[in-house]
Image (cartoon, rainbow, N blue to C red):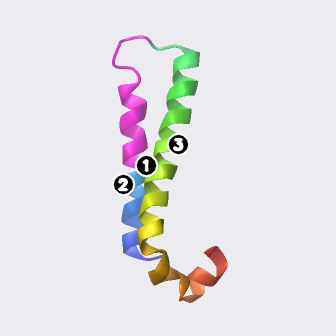
Amino acid sequence: MNKEIKWNIVNSLLAGALVFVGAFSDGNVTRTGIAIAISASLLVAITQFKKYWESEEDEYCDKTLGTFIC
């Protein structure tokens, strides 16, 4: 896997982690809050990586990796 892809996956997960931590900024920690925070953080991580992939799709779809994913 390309280093650029790995770094963008890490960056996407970090964005999701920031949303997760930010969900508890009011001081209330409940099971419902945790479930909603996890859902929101996964959505943010997927969305951020999707933005990256759309901008780089042409570069990777011509290679062998791209034939499987694209």
**Dot in front, 2 or 3:** 3
Quarter of the view holding residue 16: top left
Tell me whether the residue at label 3 lies in contact with that at label 1, contact meaning CB atoms closer than 8 angstroms.
no
> Identity of the amino acid at label 1?
Leu
Q: Tag 3: Cα neighbours inside 10 Å, few (<14), some, or many (≥20)? A: some
Residue 11 — which label? 2
Q: Secondary structure at mark 3?
A: helix
Question: At which x and y percent is residue 43?
Answer: 52, 42
Residue at the spot 52% in from the left edge and 42% down from the top edge: 42
Residue at the spot 48% in from the left edge and 38% down from the top edge: 41
Residue 43 — which label? 3
Q: Main secondary structure of the magenta part?
A: helix
Question: At which x and y percent is residue 64?
Answer: 59, 88
Span highlighted in magenta in the image? 14-28
Depicted 49 relative to depicted 53: above or below:
above
Spatial CA span between label 3 and label 1: 10 Å
Residue of label 1: 13
Front-most of 57 and 35?
57
Which numbered disc, 2 or 3, marks the residue that appears first in the sequence?
A: 2
